Amino acid sequence: MRRLLPAAFVVVFASVALRADDWPQWMGPNRDGVWRETGIIEKFPESGPKVKWRAPIAAGYSGPAVAGGKVYVMDYVRETGKVTNNPGGRDKLTGKERVLCINADTGKEIWKQEFDTAYSLSFPAGPRCTPTVQDGKVYALGAEGHFYCLDAAKGDVIWKKDFKAEYKAKTPIWGFTAHPLVVGDKVFCVVGGEGSVAVAFDKDNGKELWKALSASEQGYCPPTLIDAGGKKQVLIFHAEGVTSVDPESGKDYWSVPLKTDYAMSIAQPMRSGDYLFVSGFAAKSVVLKLSGDKPEEVWRGGSGKAVACDNSTPIIVDDVIYGNDGSSGGIIAVELKTGKRLWESQKHIDGKRKAHGTSFLVRHDDRFFLFNELGELIIAKMTPTGYDEISRAKILEPTNTCFGRKVVWSAPAFAQKCAFVRNDKELVCVALGKE
């Protein structure tokens, strides 16, 4: 992947020293879904990979972040209410949202911070966002828009925000899901409300630095920072389309319409060279060429064309998009510059077409690690000619439900030559280093 993205065009993040084996935020150190550690096993042993530890955890979709020898993850301890997982209706619950800090080597709890939180959500298991860890602070966003900056060592609250109270933002039916992005002295959030779909805060004291954009709904996609046309840009993929703003002021640079069904703008826009791929549910996708002040539209997808991702973000390798299609549940390979489908496979789940059938994709060297909704970890090669599975192991049980089937929908973390995955009952650390 690194050879595909020239320095002038790579996604730009804060210049902060990170441990080579950290995974301090959603999608990894660079938010590109690439695991760069060496000395990783080629295939699983027949008995499966070694489980280093299992730690008890409550419910939630929040993926773990790993930084400085600690794992940070969010969950929800339900006290009252019933979970029905009705995709079109909200369940009302009371309970506590928690941020947990766990020793990455032993699985022992170091600290926890908890907050009374009432839910009115569809699929209300718990928080959606992976914490973002940087410069001794943890940035954690709950499903009802409570945003906390915590001390990474002790868990003390440094500052906090309430998106609904302070910005009159409405909780999306599937909750606040946009993983916070920290760059330099700012933390960027997708908030909602009139004129405040995107908000930049001072990362140290929480002061609002700017707010921008209005949309029918804020959507579910995290903010993304790119460098194009000689300037840094924050991309906000909301329910109406993707908008580029100046990270210093929030001023609009450009906007391209892409109206998703049910406001399901979820997957992060992904870039390769001059090309930007944006996709959302259902059958909605576009490729833009980033040239000059405004991008040029290259092609749009549609029903039976390209790939339209929802729960997981695609990866681009050698001008081929590998993405998990929301409608069919299949992994689909697509030519980046033309939109032509090369192949589709449901082998990453159980071989059957399923709406929102989900695997989270992470690239490692010339192969991929996938964590699927069945609780399985997979090593596979994906090339323009097809999907070639190398190894598969059951790590944990799916404990949630979707459309009558059991699922686990939580992005993994890869750090310290291990995989860290969770369901609604436990967080598991699996050793993946060569012995």
Image (tube, rainbow, N blue to C red):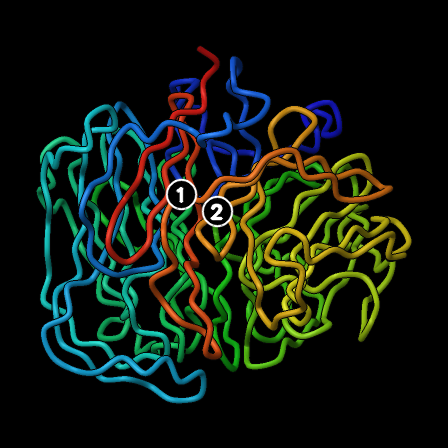
Nearest the camera: 258 or 165? 258
Of residues 310 and 273, the one nearer the viewer is 310
| Horizontal arrangement in the rendering, residue 319 relative to residue 330 (left or right) | right
For the residues bearing labels 1 and 2, Cβ distance under 8 angstroms: yes
SS of the residue at dot 1? loop
Q: Which residue is mark 2?
A: 376
Q: Earlier in the sequence, mark 1 or mark 2?
A: 2
Secondary element at image label 2:
strand
Q: Residues within 10 Å of mark 2 (few under 14, many from 20)?
A: many
The part of the image, by quadrant, that contains residue 161 is: bottom left
Residue 10 position by quadrant: top right
**Of residues 394 and 166, the one drawn nearer to the viewer in this rendering:** 394
Residue position for label 1: 395
Report the quarter where the C terminus lies: top left
Q: Amino acid at mark 1?
A: Ile
Question: What is the x, y in percent for residue 99?
Answer: 19, 49
Quadrant where the N terminus sits is: top right
Residue 149 in picture, x, y percent from top left: 21, 47
Q: Determine the residue located farthest toward the bottom in the rendered image.
A: 89
Determine which of the numbered discs, if any, sits on residue 194 in the image: none
